[in-house]
Image (cartoon, helix red, strand yellow):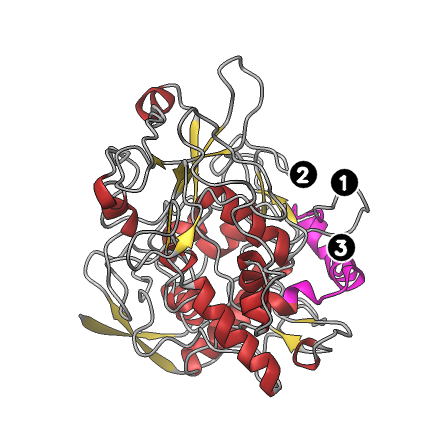
Amino acid sequence: MRSASVSVAVLSFTLFGSHPGMLTAQGPVAQSTRHQRPPGSESSGGSGAVDPGPRPGAANAGGALPGLNGGEQNVFNESLSVFMEVGSVSGTVPGEEGVGLGPTFNGNSCAQCHAQPALGGSSPGLSSPQNPVANPQVALANANGATNTVPPFITADGPVREARFIRNRDGSPDGGVHGLFTVAGRSDSGGCSLAQTNFARELSNRNVIFRIPTPTFGLGLVEATPDAVLRDNLANNQRVKSSLGIRGQLNTNGNDGTVTRFGWKAQNKSLLLFAGEAYNVEQGVSNELFPNERDVAPGCLSNGSLEDITHMEESGTAAQVSSDLVSFSMFMRFLAPADPGPSSPSVQNGANLFNAVGCALCHTTTLTSGKARYPALSNVTYHPYSDFALHHMGGGLSDGVRQGNAGPDQFRTAPLWGAGQRLFFLHDGRATDLVQAIRAHASQGSEANVVINRYNSLSSSQAQDLLNFLRSL
C-alpha cells in the first residue's frame, strides 16, 4: 500500500447550526493529512480520494454494554452462547445441536451471518482484516450431504445474502424471503425431498432482490429510545432539509401506531420480533412468535411445532429456561455499540464536512435513550449516525418491495456506527467501497441527490477527510 499527502482545502458550503442530532462544523483544518490507498480503490468526488478500506486492528465491537450488573452480564454471556449455536434438522448432528433447521434455510447459526468484525456484526468476508473467511453459505449448500446448487448470487468472496421475490407467479406482490437451500439429501433430512427454488428462472424474470445482515451492535439503546425522541429529531431542521429535498418518515406498527425501527426498511418493532422473524425465515425454525413452518411438504416436517420453546420444565438460568429467540434478543439488547477508531486532524475535519455537506441531516449523530428497565440502557446518549427514518432513495436503489409503510424505494437510514470495519454496504451488499455506496445514493427520485452533488463538488483533500472520518466510525 502506498501513502499520499494531501492538504485540506477551505470549506465553502454554508454550515448548518447545531442541534442534538448533528455535529457543529468548526471551520477548515489547515493541516496536511496522510491516508492509505489500497490497490484498485475507486476515486471519489474529489479526484484522487479513495476509501481507506476496512479499518485494521482489533475489532472494536462485540462486547457487553458498560454498566451491566452481574446477573445481566451472565445473561449476556449465556445468550451469546445461544447466538453461536449451530442448528440441524433435529439436533442429532454432532456439533449442530440446535433443533429445527429447514425445510428451507439460508444459514444454520446467527453467528454465521452476523460475524464482521465480531459476533453481532454484519456479513463476514475474505477482505476482513480481523477474520478473513469465505462466505459460509457456499459450503453450507452441500453440508451433511445436502444436494443444493449454490445460486449465482452467492459467491465465496461476496456477502451473505437472503433472496426476496418482488412478485408472485400470478403477478401479485410478494416481498417475502425465499430460502436459498433445502434439507433434501442431508443425513438428518428424514427423507425430505423438497426441491430447491428455481432461482435461475426468477433471476431471468428480474424478480429477485437481495438483503445482507444488518449489524446488531448497540440495538438495545435504539430499542430504548422513545418514539417522541425519534419524531422530534426527524422534525429538526425542516427548513434546511426541505431546501435539500430531504423529507423522511418513520415506519410505524399497524396495530398501535408506534415507531418501528429494525431491519432495512425499519419493518420490525422490537428486538424480540426481529429475532423471531429471522429465526423463522433464515433458519426455518418455528418459534413462539412465528409458530408455523413456511414450506410445508410431505416428509419434511421432522419436528412438531413449535421447534423453539420456553423450557417451562427447566429450573436453571434465564438462558436455560428461555426460548432461543428470547436469548437472541437479550444478546442484542445488551450488546454494546461499536467503538470508533483513533481520531486525527483529517478525521476531525471529515466530521465537520459530514455535517456541512448535509449527511448528518439523515445520519443523525446523537440520540438519547429514555428511562429503561435496565440502568445500562437508561438515559444514555449514543451516536448511531441514523435517524431510523425511511427515505426515498430513488430508482437506483429501489428493490420493488413494500414493508409496512415503506415503499419500493424507501429504506431506513443505515446506522453508520461500526462502518469503519464493515466490508459490504447498501441493503443488498452491492458495494464494497464507501465511494460506491455514497454515489449509489444519487438517482432519479432520491432525497439524497443534492447532498451527493455537494459531496461530488468537494476537493480531493476534503473528500478524503470525509472518507477517513467514515472509516473511523
Closer to us: 238 or 408 = 408
Q: Which residue is mark 3?
A: 238
Q: Which residue is mark 2?
A: 404
Q: Nearer the viewer, mark 3 or mark 2?
A: 2
Q: Is residue 326 visible?
A: yes
Residue 254 falls in which quadrant of the image?
top right
Amino acid at pointer 1: Gly
Q: Are marks 3 and 1 in contact (CB under 8 Å)?
A: no
Q: Are marks 1 and 2 in contact (CB under 8 Å)?
A: yes
Q: Under tag 3, what secondary structure?
A: helix
**N-terminal label among 1 and 2:** 1
What residue appears at the point 24 percent right and 63 percent down from the top-left corner?
Answer: 132
Horizontal side, residue 413 vs residue 285: left or right: right
**Magenta span:** 222-250
Residue 46: x and y in percent read 37, 59
Give the quadrant of the N terminus.
bottom left
Q: CA distance from mark 3 to mark 2?
A: 24 Å
Q: Under tag 1, what secondary structure?
A: loop
Residue 137: x and y in percent read 30, 47
Sort mark 3 into few (<14), some (14-19) or many (20+) by Cα contacts within 10 Å: some
Amino acid at pointer 3: Gln
Q: Is residue 238 magenta?
A: yes
Q: Which residue is mark 1?
A: 254
Closer to us: 99 or 71 = 99
Q: Is residue 116 magenta?
A: no
Residue 16 falls in which quadrant of the image?
bottom right
Q: Looking at the picture, does residue 172 appear above or below residue 286? A: above
